Image (cartoon, rainbow, N blue to C red):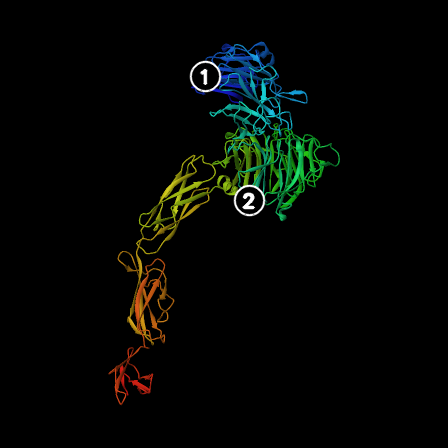
């Protein structure tokens, strides 16, 4: 089946039958019906011996109630007609009549079937992409009756289902054997059924209705067109119907160029159309561009116009213009100082080519429509369906446009253009091969222009016309082209299945495809990536995006492998400032890969090893961690990696580990080692080495398990506040035996719980080789009679338990007074007062005395507590 276009498939156990309408190989031997009876391991063409002539088979259907009954058609061969099998495709019988056979021929480019459970079969025939016949059989193909052709009457003229041959769908009503549904291209806005735009064109047919009134519209107005047609709210799906089917709820499901839509109540005009796309991302984004001012993406889409991301990272998009989107350009340089960007867009054939301005929030600001006024000769620009355009990499005021009849250059944002190529026009819808403006030898050159036209490459390095390069790299269509961002003389092109490089402005080319085609079948897009670490070539294929280092093209690797689907990547846009790559895919929307530099360094950068460790800390007495060593580049062979611990006394690793062939990583065990030393947590570096690879390194913390503490002793434990001192001795100890610790200088921070009572140094250092030191603490006279105060001294050092001791500081301001007796006669009575000091006995202490009422009792002015005495007495009279 390689190279064959499969348009229908029926699977029944190990029997698989397929229909092929054309093949890359050509000829009748490569089209028709093919069948496998071994689960798809091998296929054989079903031919004349089984009742089938040669020709193209456009569809293959199975009867819902009988899986062995199949229908197909053959045309463009020896005997055109509709054929039926009742034994699962092994044998076939022609069941069509002359009216059907007359419509099948070389101009037939689609035939579609619908089958029901009542023996009813419908067939629609398209010649030159228009429905020319629609037939029904109510007896399993024995007889056929022509139905009216579905369509509308516009201005007195009937308009049927026309358009592209793939835009036709048909399905039978599951409950009514006489009702059938069909879809085609698009309605025109304001037509006879009230269409509001170029929307879906679908109809419901009833074979029992009188001829001329068998069809009503399934879309738009229920008050215009034939009675019974329309919808409740004038709705319609996207244009260009591809398939129809009923779901379990009885709703009609349609697939079209806009995705998936649901029609409620399809048997009358009370239902409506609703999108069922959800998160399917069905857009065919054939062109993409990134706007670094708003950090959003713009896409140009097949049949879905130009769409704009509403916010950075959002999956919500809005339509800017409809139709088939044209090529997109974003100038995020010219107005960047005003936080604005300029976007160029159009629809098919460069329609409504516009230059719009947007702000940093992604809001529309203004629009202009460049006149594209021709200056000089060469004839007017003839646009292509998708007209390639390019923005100058040096001067964004300049753009080029490649029409069917040549390349046109504008120096003023498209206001005027001039032909610079003669006839180097775009030659294929798959061709978008322009590079404009570049650098070489650290100098800008806005005149550089490379263009692919058909299978040829054109180039200029100075102002003027393009010229064909002197060496022709391929005979296939040049699909895309890119240049080295630092050397415009180096260019790369792709055709369907090859990558070529020139380093001398096209004088010679070399094939750098390497192993790329072992992953992909076709190539679609190419871009050059440059960074301080690695330069790489990126190619979009039908299997995702692949990269190769520009120093070695023999090995290509897929990037973004964890996210990007297996899908055609039709366009790539690299943004250096935001370090990302945007990919436009055919059928899966737009995708973004951030952190592009790191991705490419890992995949195609210089060979290097990387080490990661989990967890990042372990205990030293047998703690375990897992190290992972990874490599980039080729995985073809096993790689032996040497492992080294920066401190084997703290953490050990095996001497080697092997990364197996086909693997990028290997794991190993890191074990904590008990060093019997209180050294706190130690950081150990694990290094991975292998010849030809840059070393990989990872750090792990090894947590100490030895007990380390400080002890503090202060002698004496009580001192007076007036000049008292004591000696503190600080000792460091560690290990299970609390042995003396001698290694390294140890800075110890000291603190006093009451600095108004006791002073001490802010820190001390126990020197390397010493286990202890002594320092003085001293009492502070606070002049407050507050009695004895207990002060806590704390010694603190990292990795050690604190040392704590207390000191009592006695108060020298405290005096007590006693009187005896407590009562005396006022007429000469006498009492004795005793005053006592409680702190120290050194020196005479003069104590002042006073009476609160000298008219009642008198005392001497002073009394002296003599040296060595704690008290003295006096008389009260």
Say whether residue 706 is left or right of residue 95.
Answer: left
| Residue beneath disc 1 | 65
Rendered image quadrant of residue 360: top right
**Residue 315 appearing in the image:** yes
Image position, residue 237 (x, y; %): 57, 28
Say whether residue 705 is left or right of residue 319.
Answer: left
Taking the view exactly as shown, the residue that stands out farthest to the left is 821
What quarter of the picture does the C terminus occupy?
bottom left
Q: Is residue 505 above or below residue 847?
A: above
Say whether residue 617 is left or right of residue 168.
Answer: left
Taking the view exactly as shown, the residue that stands out farthest to the bottom is 828
How busy is the neighbourhood of tag 2: few (under 14 within 10 Å), some, or many (20 plus)? few
Q: Secondary structure at mark 2?
A: loop
Q: Are marks 1 and 2 in contact (CB under 8 Å)?
A: no
Taking the view exactly as shown, the residue that stands out farthest to the right is 376
Name the mark nearer the viewer: 1 or 2.
Answer: 1
How busy is the neighbourhood of tag 1: few (under 14 within 10 Å), some, or many (20 plus)? few
Image position, residue 90 (x, y; %): 47, 13
Image position, residue 628 (x, y; %): 40, 42
Q: Nearer the viewer, residue 182 or 830?
A: 830
Q: Nearer the viewer, residue 70 or 646?
A: 70
Q: Nearer the viewer, residue 405 or 869?
A: 869
Disc tally is: 2
**Residue 868 appearing in the image:** no
Image position, residue 774 (x, y; %): 32, 68
Q: Secondary structure at mark 1?
A: loop
CA gap between label 1 and label 2 equals: 57 Å
The disc, 1 or 2, on the residue closer to the chain's N-terminal end is: 1
| Residue beneath disc 2 | 578
């Amino acid at each position: 089946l390689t190279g064959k276009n499969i348009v229908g498939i029926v699977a029944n156990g190990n029997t698989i039958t397929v229909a092929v309408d054309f093949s890359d190989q050509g000829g009748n031997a490569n089209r028709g019906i093919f069948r496998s009876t071994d689960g798809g391991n091998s296929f054989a063409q079903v031919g004349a011996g089984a009742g089938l002539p040669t020709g193209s088979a456009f569809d293959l259907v199975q009867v819902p109630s009988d899986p062995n009954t199949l229908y197909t058609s053959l045309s463009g061969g020896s005997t055109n007609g509709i054929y039926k099998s009742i034994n699962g495709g092994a044998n076939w019988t022609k069941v069509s009549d002359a009216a059907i056979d007359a419509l099948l021929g070389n101009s037939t480019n689609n035939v579609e079937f619908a089958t029901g459970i009542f023996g009813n079969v419908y067939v629609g025939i398209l010649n030159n992409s228009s429905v020319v016949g629609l037939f029904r059989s109510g007896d399993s193909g024995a007889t056929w009756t022509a139905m009216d052709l579905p369509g509308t009457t516009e201005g007195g003229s009937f308009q049927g289902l026309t358009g592209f041959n793939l835009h036709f769908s048909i399905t039978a009503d599951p409950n009514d054997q006489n009702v059938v549904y069909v879809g085609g291209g698009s309605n025109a806005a304001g037509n006879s059924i009230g269409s509001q735009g170029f929307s879906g064109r679908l109809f419901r047919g009833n074979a029992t209705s009188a001829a001329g009134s068998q069809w009503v519209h399934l879309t738009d107005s229920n008050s215009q067109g034939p009675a019974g047609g329309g919808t409740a709210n004038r709705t319609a799906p996207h244009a260009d119907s591809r398939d129809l089917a009923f779901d379990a709820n009885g709703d009609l499901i349609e697939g079209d160029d806009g995705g998936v839509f649901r029609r409620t109540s399809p048997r009358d005009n009370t239902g409506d159309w609703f999108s069922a796309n959800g998160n399917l991302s069905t857009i065919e984004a054939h062109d993409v561009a990134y706007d670094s001012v708003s950090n959003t993406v713009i896409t140009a889409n097949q049949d879905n116009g130009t769409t704009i991301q509403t916010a950075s990272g959002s999956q919500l998009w809005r339509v800017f213009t409809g139709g088939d989107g044209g090529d997109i350009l974003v100038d995020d340089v010219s107005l960047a100082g005003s936080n604005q960007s300029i976007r160029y867009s159009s629809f098919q054939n460069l329609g409504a080519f516009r230059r719009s301005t947007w702000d940093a929030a992604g809001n529309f600001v203004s629009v202009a429509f460049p006149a594209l006024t021709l200056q000089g000769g060469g004839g007017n620009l003839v646009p292509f369906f998708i007209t390639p355009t390019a923005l100058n990499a040096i001067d964004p005021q300049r753009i080029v446009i490649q029409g069917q009849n040549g390349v046109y250059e504008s120096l003023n944002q498209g206001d005027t253009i001039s032909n610079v190529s003669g006839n180097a026009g775009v030659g294929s819808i798959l061709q978008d091969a322009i590079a404009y403006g570049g650098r070489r030898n650290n100098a800008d050159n806005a005149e550089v222009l490379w263009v692919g036209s058909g299978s040829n490459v054109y180039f200029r390095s100075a102002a003027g016309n393009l010229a064909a390069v002197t060496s022709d790299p391929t005979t296939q269509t040049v699909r895309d082209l890119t240049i080295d961002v630092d050397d415009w003389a180096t260019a790369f092109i792709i055709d369907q299945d090859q990558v070529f490089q020139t380093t001398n402005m096209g004088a010679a080319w070399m094939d750098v495809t390497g192993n790329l085609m072992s992953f992909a079948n076709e190539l679609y897009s190419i871009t050059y990536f440059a960074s301080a670490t690695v330069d790489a070539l990126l190619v979009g294929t039908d299997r995702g995006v692949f990269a190769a280092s520009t120093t070695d093209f023999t090995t290509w690797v897929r990037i973004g492998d964890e996210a990007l689907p297996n899908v055609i990547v039709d366009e790539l846009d690299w943004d250096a400032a935001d370090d990302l790559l945007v990919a436009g895919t055919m059928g899966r929307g737009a995708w973004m890969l951030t952190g592009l530099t790191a991705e490419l360094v890992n995949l195609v950068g210089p060979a290097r090893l990387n080490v990661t460790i989990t967890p990042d800390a372990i205990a030293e007495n047998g703690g375990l961690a897992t190290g992972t060593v990874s490599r980039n580049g080729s995985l073809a062979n096993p790689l032996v990696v040497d492992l080294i611990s920066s401190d084997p006394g703290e953490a050990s690793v095996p001497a080697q580990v092997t990364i197996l062939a086909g693997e990028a990583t290997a794991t190993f065990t890191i074990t904590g080692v008990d060093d019997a030393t209180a050294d706190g947590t130690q950081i150990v570096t694990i290094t991975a080495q292998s010849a030809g690879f840059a070393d990989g390194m990872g750090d792990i913390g090894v947590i100490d398990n030895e007990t380390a503490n400080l002890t503090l002793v202060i002698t004496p434990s009580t001192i007076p506040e007036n000049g008292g001192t004591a000696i503190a001795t600080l000792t460091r100890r560690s290990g299970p035996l609390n042995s003396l610790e001698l290694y390294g200088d140890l800075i110890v921070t000291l603190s006093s719980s009451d600095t108004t009572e006791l002073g001490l140094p802010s820190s001390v250092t126990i020197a390397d080789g010493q286990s202890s030191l002594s320092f003085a603490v001293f009492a502070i006279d606070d002049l407050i009679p507050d009695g004895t105060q207990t002060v806590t001294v704390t010694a603190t050092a990292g990795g050690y338990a604190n040392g704590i001791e207390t000191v009592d500081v006695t108060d020298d301001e405290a005096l007590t007074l006693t009187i005896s007796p407590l009562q005396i006669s006022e007429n000469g009575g006498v009492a004795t007062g005793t005053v006592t000091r409680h702190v120290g006995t050194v020196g005479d202490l003069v104590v002042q005395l006073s009476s609160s009422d000298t008219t009642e009792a008198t005392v001497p002015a002073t009394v002296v507590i003599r040296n060595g005495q704690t008290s003295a007495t006096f008389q009260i009279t």
